[in-house]
Image (cartoon, grey):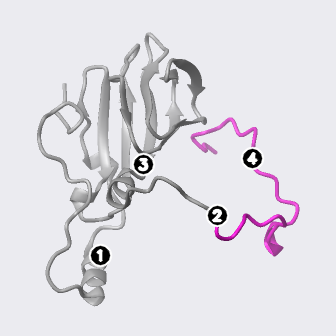
Amino acid sequence: MGKDSHYSSKKDRVFVRGMQGQYSLREELARLRAMPRVIKGREMKFVDGPQSFSKHFVEPVDGLTQTLHVHLEEYAPGGRTQKHGHVNEAAFYILDGKGYEVHDGVRYDWQAGDVAIVHNNCVHQHFNASPDKPARALVIKSKPMYMFMNMLFQKSVIPRPTEPAAGGVGFEPRHDETNLNHDE
C-alpha cells in the first residue's frame, strides 16, 4: 500500500498558495519560469490504496499553478473509491479499463476514451467494473479556483464561433479512433 495522501488523512491541505510581501510580476514570472514545465510521472509514486491509488501531478502546494489540480487515479481490479462530494466540478479522462460512476444515486458506465464529468455538489463514487484488470483515469479539477473565487455562476461574454477557422474548413474530429495508445 502507498502512503496516505490528503484524501484519507487528517493533515492540513493547501488549496491556494498565499502570496505575501510586495507584489512583483517580474519576480513572479522569473519564479514561474524557473519551475519545471514537464512533470515526470514515472518519477512519482502512487499513494493511498488498496482499492484506489492517486498520483498528484499538479496542485497549488507545488507552486506551479494556482487554479488547477491534476492527478492520476488507478483503480485496482474490482476497486472503488470513497463515496464523496465536493463543490467543484471534475473531469475524468478514462485512459484504460472499464468501470462506472454513481452520481447522486444514478449509475454511469465508462470505458477507455470516455470522459466522466462530476458536477458541482454531486455526491459520487468511482468503481472499476473489471474483477481482474486495473483501470486508470486522468483527473482535472478547478477546485483551487472554486475555493479561492467562490465562483458559483458563470456567463458567456463572447459566444462560441459558429463558423470554422480558415485552416479548419472541412475538418472532422476522429470520433472512431480505437488505437488510444497511438501505436504505429
Q: Position of residue 103 (x, y in %)?
A: 50, 25
Mark nearer the N terminus (3 vs 2): 3
Q: Is residue 97 above or below residue 167?
A: above
Question: Between marks 3 and 4, how big is the CA–CA gap?
Answer: 25 Å
Q: Badge 1, how many Cα within 10 Å: few under 14, some, many 20+?
A: some
Q: Which mark is residue 156?
A: 2
Mark 3–mark 2 distance (CA, rounded to whole Å): 20 Å
Q: Nearer the viewer, mark 3 or mark 4?
A: 3
SS at badge 4: loop
Q: Disc 3 designates what residue?
A: 141
Residue where numbered disc 1 is placed = 32
N-terminal of the pair, mark 2 or mark 1, is: 1
Whichever of labels 1 and 3 marks the residue nearer the N terminus, that label is 1
Check if residue 146 falls in the magenta segment. no
Among numbered discs 3 and 4, the one appearing first in the sequence? 3
Q: Which SS class for mark 2?
A: loop
